[in-house]
Amino acid sequence: MEVLGIDIGGSGIKGALVNTQTGAMLTDRFRILTPSSRKPEEMAEVVAQIAKHFDYSGPIGVGFPSIVKKGICKSKGNLHKSWVGVNIIGLFERHTGAKVFVNNDADAAATAEMAFGAGKDKKGLVMMVTIGTGLGSGAFLDGKLIPNFELGQIPYKSYDKIELWASAAAKEKEMLSFKRWAKRFNTFLEYVEIICAPDLIIVGGGTSKDWERFSEHISIETPILPAEFLNQAGIIGAAMGAVQK
């Protein structure tokens, strides 16, 4: 089935048409900068612009960077605080005129990797970590999703949440080398290892394309693999969510 998948991030909102049976992207990715306000109405309008760009009117799957329960935003994440309590599905359907399905963005990326990528046929507890404006995390136990596993929200030292210290946004803000940043990211992975004892960790998100530049500085015991779909996993998994409901 051909479905529009949209991956919402703190810096950009991306979409593409996806074959949900094979995981193949059928179009180039189309990206619009996330509005600087990061408020609901402005971001919903961008989602509508992406649907219009593809001249698309079918179901839309969306990966959203926050805790999502029954379509409701439960945490602001890296967005504006006014998102809390918003019916994301209702908002996006009003702007697009289409049927919309919403999952946590890291859960969406993990869904793609478990079905077609680095996690295919893997059993046990598989964690997906996405590196971007924040640190997203998705979890699958024996092939079944455990939703909203937001490990980037763990407090760390003087930081409200560890992703403020160890994300790609922190790397850019502090102009860290890959080596210095990777040591921070490795600290985060050590927490994931202690708390969850996963059997495999898959690293995705925008920074995963630079895997060769920082992987040598990752020293956890858990097996770790780069996402096969890199930063496209969120789009693919979001589209898959629209046909799995």
Image: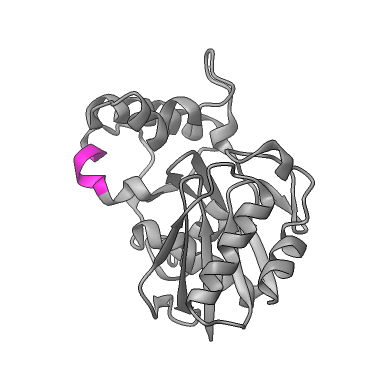
Q: Which percent across, then down, holds residue 239?
A: 54, 72
| Magenta-span inclusion, residue 214 | yes
The residue sitting at 55% across, 82% down in the picture is 56
The residue sitting at 75% across, 58% down in the picture is 71
The segment highlighted magenta reads 210-215
Q: Nearer the viewer, residue 118 or 51?
A: 51
In the image, farthest residue toward the top: 158
Tell me how the rendering is colored: one colour
Q: Which percent across, then down, holds residue 241?
A: 61, 69
Magenta-drawn stretch, dominant element (helix, strand or loop):
helix
Left or right position of 43 against 202 = right
Is residue 39 in sight in this rendering? yes
| Magenta-span inclusion, residue 131 | no
Q: Which percent across, then down, holds residue 147?
A: 65, 52
Query: Which picture quadrant has residue 91?
Result: bottom right
Is residue 224 in sight in this rendering? no
How many discs appear? Answer: 0
Q: Is residue 204 above or below residue 153?
A: below
Q: Is residue 6 above or below residue 180?
A: below
In the image, farthest residue toward the bottom: 1
Left or right position of 18 against 51 = left
Left or right position of 6 against 180 = right
Q: Which percent across, then down, holds residue 80?
A: 65, 39
